[in-house]
């Protein structure tokens, strides 16, 4: 009876340790998977324009920047550049579609969205391996 009790306690101890390790691995993987890039209004041309930053959701996952537009904002110009100003990608997309941009090198970048009404939104992000 004592051997059975010791075996069950040892099994519980090993199982608890395994579950803790698995939880830490999952948490580390989720942190590495990607994150949302916060953007803010940097320049507003129209006096009556409302803030559309909630309608633009950029998300960086590894070397891929994915952007989802949740509203029809018209034709939007999107530019991805390094923080020093070198352009990586520049394109114009209709909304409310999405887009993906592959960024080949590690480093700090800025994504800029220019709406058809002249409002400019920007956000900074980092690409790491």
Image (cartoon, helix red, strand yellow):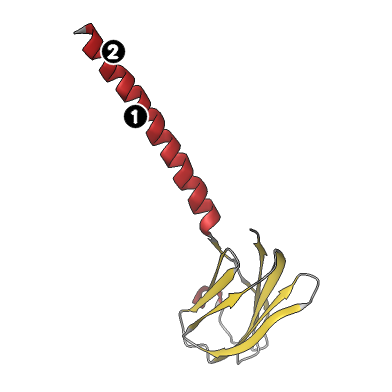
Please provide percent x and percent y for residue 73.
52, 88
Quick one: quadrant of the C terminus?
bottom right
Say which quarter of the image contains residue 49.
Answer: bottom right
Q: Nearer the viewer, residue 111 or 107?
A: 107
Q: Characterize the local packing of mark 1: few (<14), some (14-19) or many (20 or more) Cα atoms within 10 angstroms.
A: few
Quick one: quadrant of the N terminus?
top left
Q: Is residue 31 visible?
A: yes
Q: Nearer the viewer, residue 35 or 32?
A: 32
Asked whether, in this view, residue 7 is left or right of residue 60, the answer is left
Asked whether, in this view, residue 59 is left or right of residue 2, the answer is right
Q: Is residue 56 visible?
A: no
Please provide percent x and percent y for residue 36.
54, 64
Q: Return the residue at label 1.
A: 15
The residue at the point 53 percent across, 52 percent down is 31
Please provide percent x and percent y for residue 53.
56, 75
Q: Residue furthest right?
A: 84
Please provide percent x and percent y for residue 80.
67, 77
Q: Return the residue at label 2.
A: 6
The residue at the point 37 percent across, 26 percent down is 14
The residue at the point 57 percent across, 70 percent down is 64
The residue at the point 42 percent across, 40 percent down is 22
Indicate which disc residue 81 carries.
Answer: none
Q: What is the spatial separation of the Cα atoms under label 1 and label 2, in whole angstroms?
A: 14 Å
Q: Characterize the local packing of mark 2: few (<14), some (14-19) or many (20 or more) Cα atoms within 10 angstroms.
A: few
Q: Residue furthest left?
A: 1
Say which quarter of the image contains residue 23.
Answer: top left
Q: SS for tag 1?
A: helix
């Amino acid at each position: 009876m004592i051997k059975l009790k010791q075996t069950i306690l040892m099994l519980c101890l090993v199982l608890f340790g395994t579950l803790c390790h698995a939880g830490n691995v999952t948490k580390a993987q989720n942190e590495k998977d990607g994150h949302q890039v916060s953007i803010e209004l940097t320049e507003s041309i129209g006096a009556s324009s409302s803030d559309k930053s909630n309608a633009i959701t950029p998300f960086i996952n590894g070397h891929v920047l994915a952007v989802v537009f949740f509203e029809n904002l018209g034709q939007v110009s999107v530019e991805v550049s390094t923080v020093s100003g070198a352009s990586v990608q520049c394109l114009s997309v209709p909304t409310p579609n999405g887009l993906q941009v592959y960024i080949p090198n590690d480093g700090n970048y800025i994504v800029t969205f220019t709406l058809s009404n002249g409002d400019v939104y920007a956000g900074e992000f980092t690409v790491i391996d």
